[in-house]
Amino acid sequence: MNKIPVITSAEQSDQAAKKVNLLGMSKDELSAFFVSLGEKPFRATQVMKWIYQFGVTDFFEMTNISKKLQHKLHEVACVVPPTVKYKEFSQDGTRKWVFEVAGGSLVETVLIPADDGKQFGRKTLCISSQVGCALDCSFCSTGKQGFERDLTPSEIIGQLWVANQSYMENVPPTERENRVTNVVMMGMGEPLLNYNPVVAAMSLMLDDHAFGLSKRRVTLSTSGVVPKMYDLAKDIDVALAISLHAPNDELRNELVPINKKYPLKDLIKAAKSYVYDENPRHKKHITIEYVMLAGVNDSDEHAHQLVDLLKDLPSKINLIPFNPFPHAPYGRSSNNRIHAFSHILNQAGFVCTIRQTRGDDIDAACGQLVGQVADRTRRAKKWQESIQKRQSHHE
Ligand code: SAH
Ligand code: SF4
């Protein structure tokens, strides 16, 4: 599906020029690679296990592989995750990484543990799929940066690999375990606009020879790239989250501009088709995400409209308190308002959760992963100019 991934980090680009990066290759690609070396294809699954389950990058530590093959691999291949530029581990267990990917762009990844504080409890990793985003939703700071580039499969899966690695220090290779239990594609970027690399990376998340996560624990979040939702239903079985944020086209056009291209009627139709797959074994789950913006989309009337819109779509609704960023044109709805809104949805029979904001001490709320990313696009420049204009207007 995708080409052999290129090495991602600037520091290791020397190595990259000569060696093939095995991180991010599918089982089929890796089998073909071993065949090209004159080896049996099953070497692929052996090596995948070392890379993904034991976090091993050094071929000489892969003890079930012959010395001769270890040397050969050392010469021609490598296992290189994206470079960690910065990391921060918060008191509440939240962990955040800023990665530098090829070309010097920065992307962010956040791990959010469940509240129970259990060592092996649920740990959800929020992964980025692109540097920046082309879609410009009005409440999203990633959108304000504009779009820089797509991430490769190795840069996407590398985020999960590094997060798991952070729990493996000082543990002997064969005793290591992956700790991340859930993945959400809710970091920077619109995953359905970087389709092939995202599907390739999610396939590795599900693959038993790689991370082996259950399909219910891998969630792709989209703002509604409708044609790609149909493709997704065919290509891979994962949970889907739809960033709805508004119950009518007029408001959604303003908040999520891709709605002008794919209005609610089309989006809801695609969502229904995703849930009601022809194959009953593929029964899928949908979560509706709804960011709570004070005085904008959070009235009782909006809640009733939402009930009406979703009445034939089996889904869970997740209300997300707006996460402010500097100069954002919105405020967060009050807790009372969020509860009143949620009450209306509950009364109508919907399961509705309110997202806890976690990791505030390291600025790590999921879906809001920006901050230090270089402002290098035209859109970023325009956004900065509009802030300056607003400021001088107030002076
Ligand atoms: N592009 C995809 C995935 C990344 S955004 C999408 O839009 O779904 C992940 C989630 O965070 C989305 O639901 C998005 O709407 C939400 N989000 C973005 N900015 C936010 C903010 N400032 N506060 C709260 N949620 C935000
Ligand atoms: Fe892009 Fe998602 Fe942000 Fe919209 S909410 S600008 S689609 S990252």
Image: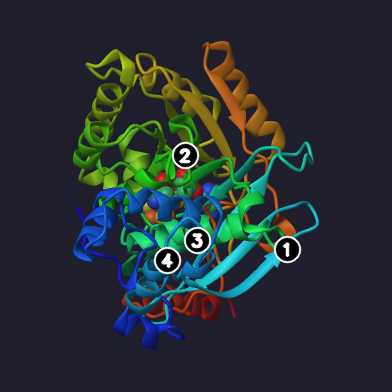
Q: CA distance from mark 4 to mark 2?
A: 35 Å
Residue 255: x percent and y percent? 39, 48
Residue type marked 2 = Gly
Q: Mark 1 and ligand 1: say if the CB distance to the nearest ligand atom is below 8 Å.
A: no
* Front-most of residues 128 and 213: 213
Q: CA distance from mark 2 to mark 1?
A: 23 Å
Q: CA distance from mark 3 to mark 1?
A: 17 Å
| Contact check, label 4 and label 3, Cβ < 8 Å | no
Residue 77, above or below 164: below
| Contact check, label 2 and label 3, Cβ < 8 Å | no
Q: Which is more foreground, mark 4 or mark 3?
A: 3
Residue 185, above or below 313: below
| Secondary element at tag 3 | loop
Residue type marked 3 = Met
Q: Residue at x 71, y 32 (%)?
A: 336
Pointer 2 residue: 212
| Secondary element at tag 2 | loop
Work out which quarter of the rendered image holds the C terminus and state it.
bottom right
| Contact check, label 2 and label 1, Cβ < 8 Å | no
Q: CA distance from mark 1 to mark 4?
A: 41 Å
| Contact check, label 4 and label 2, Cβ < 8 Å | no
Q: Which is more foreground, mark 2 or mark 3?
A: 3
Residue 382: x percent and y percent? 37, 76
Q: Earlier in the sequence, mark 2 or mark 1?
A: 1
| Contact check, label 3 and label 1, Cβ < 8 Å | no
Q: Residue at x 32, y 76 (%)?
A: 76
Residue 339: x percent and y percent? 67, 28
| Contact check, label 1 and label 4, Cβ < 8 Å | no
